[in-house]
Amino acid sequence: MDVIIKEKNSNKISRILIYLVLSIFAIYFLLPVFVMIITSLKDINEIKNGNILSMPQHFTIQPWIDAWQNARIGASAHGIKPYFINSIMITVPAVLISSIIGSFNGYVFAKWKFKGSDLFFAFLLFGCFIPFQVILLPMSQTLGKLGLSQSVFGLIFVHIVYGISFTSLFFRNFYVSIPTELINAAKIDGAGFFRIFFKILLPVSLPIFMVCIIWQMTQIWNDFLFGVTFSDVSTQPVTVALNNLVNSTSSVKRYNIDMAAALIAVAPTLIAYIVSGKYFVKGLMAGAVK
Amino acid sequence: MKSLSIKNLHKKYDQTEVLRGIDISLESGEFLVLVGPSGCGKSTLLSCIAGLEEITSGSIKLGEKDITHASPKDRELAMVFQSYALYPNMTVRQNIEFGLKISKYSKEEIENRIQSAASMLQIKELLNRKPAQLSGGQRQRIAIARSISREPSIYLFDEPLSNLDAELRVRMRAEIKKLHKKVKKTIVYVTHDQIEAMTLADKIAIMHNGTIQQFDTPINVYNNPCNLFTAGFIGSPSMNFIDVKIQKNGNKYFINLKNEIQEDNFLYLDASYEYLEKYLNKEVIAGIRPEHMQNGFRSLEISHELQDLKANISFSEYTGADAFLFLKLNDTDVIARVSSDDLKADGENIALKVWTKKILFFDKKTENRIR
């Protein structure tokens, strides 16, 4: 009996310790976000008085409105709204197209192996490890030759090319875990390459599609380097605009608007994670186990 | 209903040859079982017949049609897989329909085929379920129904029962046998389970290292194995192999099986063993099935073919109807299958009878049967 009670107690203590440590880390990570939120809800005068860490005395959403449509970025004063729209215009097609191409690639690499396909796949994987900076120059030349430089289409193109390595890898690992007997049964039933893909594999691919979409969306939405390199004033994505907003100082540093703009800029990826996070873990595991 | 003829089939993966010269000729309506240890090439051979694997050389004919290079769908065959391979996103009905729709049959024709396949396998009430909602046995039924609905000339089964539990396996085995009687189609069936092979087959092909060791009826495979491998592979517990020296006394050949305490057991062989002449005074391998060394031979007709064997029981295994005695003869561990009545204790001596007429001999070098 004593032993059991002791064990129970030590269990309880270790539980409490675990929660304590976790809470400390959670607070540590969430504190900056908290400061951002309260700052974005304060009047600029309140901030100027030096109380950046205290709770706002008068709540106001004016900084959010200003950040969205009135703040001065470079020469224009339309807030980050046009650049937010740019980011959507870049992200949506780039995510979808790279995921679709990736699913086809993954299907071929997993189930229609050809001579040298493993080598081909290995080369494709290099794409996952090449640092962004390395391809800046050749890519800008390529975009120039294609007539896509400084345009939204150029950025879409870059993100698709860069994303295919990752999406192909995700889809291949997912499809490898699907029994080949299923493909063979369909072949005997008379289904061809495309019918097997669309009727048999695609209907079970939702988890991995979610992984790809979240991954690609985070990558593309948060990208700064490609955005700053391959865009101009009117086509820059929201990350670049945010940087310009913070840097284009007038007489006073308007921290509240900066914070609001930053929160707006990270909102889409944050929401995507919250909505479909469970698919992300499930989908990533699907390829790993088995 | 068509015959199957495979000639000199070879299959190589890069440098490794997994099938080396397979010849099979199967009458239409026959049930062929490919059996062998894992890695012997039996599943590869089935994939080659199905057209899922391109063969390196040789030819495959179905009836009069050469299908060596035909695509799987043009081979008039249906296949049942080990993992059932049901499309997980489709209902049972859609699973059966899938191939039929691709083949562009009319709506009524498809419905007729679904209904007849479903009633034959008693799965009518499952038609609207998804595979995930079914038990293993039900899934296997659906997989078989799907293949029946294609009305193929030949059925291929790839270890269809190995994922089922023991009881269900026996039931499904009987159903497959019944099904074959009903549809009377040619079947090629892969298994590593020799009981399945023996019970289902009209013809058994025993495979080893990418070759067919013996292609014969179950009875012949059991009674007349052509070499050491097939003799050892079929039968459970497997045949005992004992090194013996062929000796002659007058015009009668005999062998000696010394027991644990070096007591002689001379076994005299009758006139049908004349072929042993060229092995006189040489060592050969004697093959004796466990049931041919026992204490309960009932038939009086064979009583003059029985000879005494004195042995010492190392230990015994009681299995219910029978008991397996582990003995030592000529310093080799052997198993005798005896009646479990009056079972003697371990370490005791026992007097058994050997049905000498059933002893087979194998060449020590070539491992082929001497006959």
Image (cartoon, coloured by chain):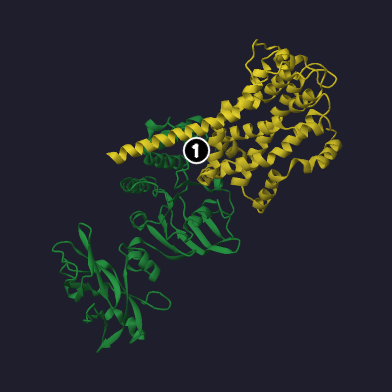
Chain colours: A yellow, B green
- Residue at 41% x, 52% y: name it: B29
- Residue at 26% x, 87% y: name it: B251
Residue B239 sits in which quadrant?
bottom left
Residue A218 location in percent, x, y?
66, 31
Q: Is residue A116 left or right of residue B82?
A: right
B196 vs B14, nearest the viewer: B14
Q: Is residue B143 left or right of residue A117?
A: left
The kind of residue on which mark 1 rests is: Tyr
- Residue at 67% x, 22% y: name it: A263
Q: Is residue B28 visible?
A: yes
A242 vs B371, nearest the viewer: A242
How many marks on residues? 1
Q: Secondary structure under badge 1? A: loop
Q: Is residue A242 left or right of residue B315?
A: right
Chain letter belonging to callout 1: B
Q: Is residue A69 placed above or below B21 in the rendered structure? A: above
Residue A16 location in percent, x, y?
44, 32
Residue B12 location in percent, x, y?
57, 61
Q: Is residue A171 left or right of residue B277?
A: right
The residue indicated by pointer 1 is: B87
Q: Is residue B63 visible?
A: no
Residue B46 location in percent, x, y?
49, 54
Image quarter hosting the C terminus of chain B:
bottom left
Label 1 CA crowd tier, 10 Å (few <14, some 14–19, many 20+) = many
Residue A147 sits in which quadrant?
top right
Residue at the outermost bottom position: B250
Residue B33 sits in which quadrant?
bottom left
